[in-house]
Image (tube, rainbow, N blue to C red):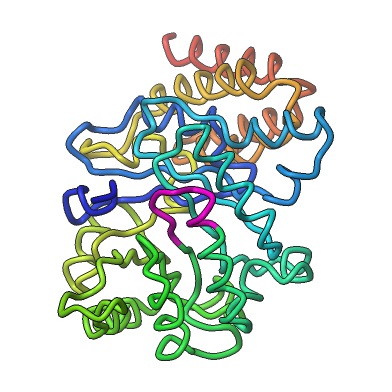
Amino acid sequence: MDFWEKLPKPFFVLAPMEDVTDVAFRTLIAKYASPDVPRVFYTEFTSADGLILADEKGKRKILKKLEYGNAERSVVAQLFTSNLEHMEAAAQVCRELGFDGFDINMGCPAREVERQNCGAALIKDPAHARALIRAAKRGFGGPVSVKTRIGYNEDELETWLPELLAEEPAAVVLHARTRKEMSEVPARWERVARGVEIRNSIQNPRGDASRIQTVIIGNGDVKDIADARAKCEATGADGAMLGRAVFGNPWLFSNRTGEPTQEEKTRTLIEHIELFQKMMSGYQSDAVMKRHFKAYIGGWDGAKELRTHLMEASSLDEAKRLLNGHLEALRI
């Protein structure tokens, strides 16, 4: 039994978001998570080709994207490539790094990714998608999952999902939109429910009477843990993945109720900056923190002015000085 099967249901998954869910932010989210909220953390979207082909300097930068702490467990590495040999070799690296699971991205709509026959482009090439799953299994030797969409230009769930399930991945994350729709329409969670039905209807391909054990995880427009629970209950999904809801909200995987105070948000943003400086300095541009400034600082009078000053700050140290000054002003 792999870790996916052991998780209490429903469980909740932190989505892989490039330049957002780095090890610094995941460390913060893990700190504030409640131990009784069953969770899985995904790493940032990472290139398997880069991991295998990069020189030593480049490889160190890529490995930083695969860094994690034990507080994050269960933790899954998410990689992409269309090269079978690179997939197997990268999966083996992830096994050696001690990851609980390995995930193949088959849903990213970015043009530069699709040009490599990766991400959502694989929806148009089921045979190769299946070969990539087999390669990942050979390399990782543990639970391999797939994150994908319900179709490319149109809904293809009825044909696409059975292709994936034929390889018996440990989990399939279904983003309930097509590639063409991006995130511009509401996620159709009724299609997640249909994905559960399709999974339940497929017998084990080895020929015995049992059903396949792949867990189905819904993704798209999940607001918080309560909303995730409700969506899983309504659809029968084993779990839900949360993405944009985590912006400015490292408390997402906690059981806390009520909005954090202005002081809490400010203190936590300072903590986030310090973790970023400690863990990401030299590997990532300080500019990526600006999207977090926008997310944390809001919801009170004067927030817009503070946010503007933070966006114009010349360094993260200056941003911390501005935030500490704001805390001092709150005490007066």
Residue at horizontal 30 percent and vertical 66 percent from the top: 214
Q: In the rendering, at what x and y percent does residue 35 appear?
A: 21, 32
Q: Is residue 285 above or below residue 241?
A: above
Q: Is residue 317 above or below residue 296?
A: above
Q: Is residue 68 above or below residue 332?
A: below
Q: The C terminus appears in which quarter of the rendering?
A: top left
Residue 6 versus residue 254: which sits nearer the camera? 6
Q: Is residue 329 above or below residue 142?
A: above
Does residue 234 appear to the left or right of 106 in the view shown? left
Which residues are drawn in magenta? 136-145
Q: In the rendering, at what x and y percent does residue 136 appear?
A: 53, 57
Residue 84 in magenta?
Answer: no
Residue at horizontal 49 percent and vertical 29 percent from the top: 68
Residue 153 versus residue 290: which sits nearer the camera? 153
Does residue 217 appear to the left or right of 237 in the view shown? right
Residue at horizontal 58 percent and vertical 36 percent from the top: 66
